[in-house]
Image (spheres, grey):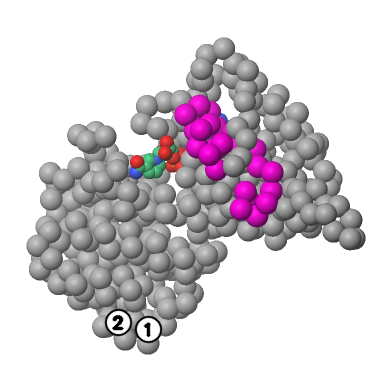
């Protein structure tokens, strides 16, 4: 089969779904690879590097989609891209079917199959294809780097001839994949890191990474924990306790990184305006939940600004794209693993096995039908 990677057309999107290395691995599955000219440029992969890896360069998106059997990309397709699909083709990209129903209908009507990388079930066997996690890991890391670039002091404490420097106090709200990556990065830079999550089972993980768990005195063990490892909305009483704790911490924190999300809902507002106002001048807030409305009340999605009391608030929504070489390397590996599972014979023949929990879970359109939401996976 011919596997073709499109150039991303969303302004500012620097990632690419195929790298020269992933192309070589895809070719070992018996496929041939194509890429739209310039698709890897913003990630640091030139057309020449792809050519050297045996990839055919095609001049534009229309030619690529006309030639390829499987189209891979990062962002959900734009309507003009989806319009190019045809029956018998497979598209593999992020898709977010719950918020893209029109796009899903458009793709379904073409008869093409769509595999949504954001719908890969989060079970152990599928970790190698879990692009949400690989991108969240980068976002968490980059959040700390971004915080450092906007913070006028060291992370680590120092005693120097020119004076004693206290370590930065960092609070991470939400310790999922991104939060844990942020904890690891901030600890490694020498900050004193505090972290909070509504899921009590992460306390041990937080502490094993060298951060301290922000403990709330609350009678029920915890009410924000739900099934499947994800958080559920907190009760009003719990939320009040949480906000009271954050109010107490706000004047002491130099950097606050918020990553709290609840699947299918807007981000919970956890860092209120009065907390921002209580922070010291020079402090930094990085809101990784900005795309879903933000955990911080002051956040403006896609913007960075300084509040009147001197706090920098960063609401970028493209952290993985800001580390495009790394993000493309990991995402293209996730895609390559998906193609490996779709090519069981390693013979260049694609087998879209809807009996396979992972492939079934991620397939949102197939043979002219919408196949989302999927039935619950059999394996946990
Ligand atoms: P996420 O991005 O959905 O949410 C981020 C974090 O925010 C979560 O830890 C959540 O508990 C927390 N949160 C929600 N509301 C909060 C609040 N009010 N205050 C503080 N924190 C709040 O999470 P994620 O990174 O996608 O991971 C969610 C779960 O999925 C975790 O249990 C993780 O271990 C699990 N997971 C499993 C796999 C796998 O098995 N393949 C892969 C990735 C993640």
Q: Counting other residues with Cα less than 10 Å from the Cα at mark 2, is it few (<14), some (14-19), or many (20 or more)?
A: some
Distance from disc 1 to disc 2, alpha carbons, whole Å, reads 6 Å
Q: Is residue 196 above or below residue 19?
A: above
Q: Is residue 356 above or below residue 62?
A: above
Secondary structure of the residue carrying tag 2 is: loop
Magenta stretch: residue 96 in it? no
Q: Viewer-proximal residue, 31 or 208?
A: 208
Q: Where does the image place residue 286, in percent across and percent down from the top left?
A: 64, 49
The disc placed on residue 59 is none
Secondary structure of the residue carrying tag 1 is: helix
Q: Where does the image place residue 336, in percent across and percent down from the top left?
A: 27, 63
The disc placed on residue 53 is 2
Using the rendered view, name the quadrant where residue 123 is placed. top left
What residue sits 26% from the left and 53% below the top? 115
Can you see residue 352? yes
Give, as a single range, the part of the protein colored magenta: 186-209
Q: Is the Cβ of the residue at disc 1 closer than 8 Å to that at disc 2?
A: yes
Q: Viewer-proximal residue, 334 or 5?
A: 334
Q: Is residue 281 above or below residue 338?
A: above
Magenta stretch: residue 188 in it? yes
The disc placed on residue 49 is 1
What residue sits 56% from the left and 49% below the top? 184
Q: Where does the image place residue 270, in percent across and percent down from the top left?
A: 63, 33
Using the rendered view, name the quadrant where residue 246 is placed. top right
Q: Viewer-proximal residue, 303 or 168?
A: 168
Q: Name the residue at the top extreme.
A: 219
Q: Where does the image place residue 186, in percent across and percent down from the top left?
A: 63, 50
């Amino acid at each position: 089969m011919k596997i073709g990677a499109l150039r991303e057309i969303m302004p500012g999107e620097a990632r690419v779904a195929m790298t020269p290395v992933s192309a070589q691995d895809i070719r070992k599955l018996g496929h041939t690879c194509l890429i739209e000219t310039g698709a890897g440029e913003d990630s640091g992969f030139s057309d020449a590097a792809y050519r050297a890896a045996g990839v055919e360069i095609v001049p534009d998106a229309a030619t690529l989609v006309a030639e390829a059997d499987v189209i891979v990309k990062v962002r959900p397709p734009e309507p003009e891209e989806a319009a190019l699909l045809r029956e018998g083709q497979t598209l593999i990209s992020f898709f977010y079917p719950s918020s893209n129903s029109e796009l899903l209908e458009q793709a379904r009507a073409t008869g093409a199959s769509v595999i949504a990388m954001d719908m890969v079930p989060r079970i152990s066997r599928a970790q190698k294809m879990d692009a949400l996690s690989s991108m969240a890991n980068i976002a968490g890391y980059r959040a700390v780097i971004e915080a450092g670039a906007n913070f006028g002091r060291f992370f680590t404490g120092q005693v120097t001839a020119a004076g004693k420097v206290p370590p930065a106090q960092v609070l991470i709200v939400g310790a999922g994949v991104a939060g844990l990556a942020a904890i690891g990065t901030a600890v490694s830079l020498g900050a004193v890191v505090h972290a909070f999550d509504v899921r009590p089972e992460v306390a041990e993980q937080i502490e094993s990474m060298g951060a301290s768990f922000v403990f709330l005195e609350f009678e029920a063990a915890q009410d924000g924990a739900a099934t499947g490892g994800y958080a559920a909305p907190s009760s009003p009483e719990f939320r009040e306790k949480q906000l009271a704790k954050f109010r107490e911490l706000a004047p002491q924190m130099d950097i606050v990184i918020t990553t709290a999300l609840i699947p299918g809902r807007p981000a919970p507002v956890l860092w209120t305006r009065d907390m921002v106002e209580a922070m010291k001048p020079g402090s930094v807030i990085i809101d990784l939940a900005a795309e879903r409305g933000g955990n911080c009340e002051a956040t403006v999605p896609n913007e960075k600004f300084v509040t009147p009391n001197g706090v920098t608030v960063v609401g970028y929504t493209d952290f993985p794209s800001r580390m495009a070489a790394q993000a493309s390397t990991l995402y293209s590996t996730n895609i390559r693993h998906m193609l490996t599972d779709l090519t069981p014979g390693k013979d260049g023949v694609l087998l879209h096995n809807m009996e396979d929990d992972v492939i079934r879970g991620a397939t949102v359109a197939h043979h002219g039908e919408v196949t989302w939401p999927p039935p619950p996976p059999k394996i946990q």
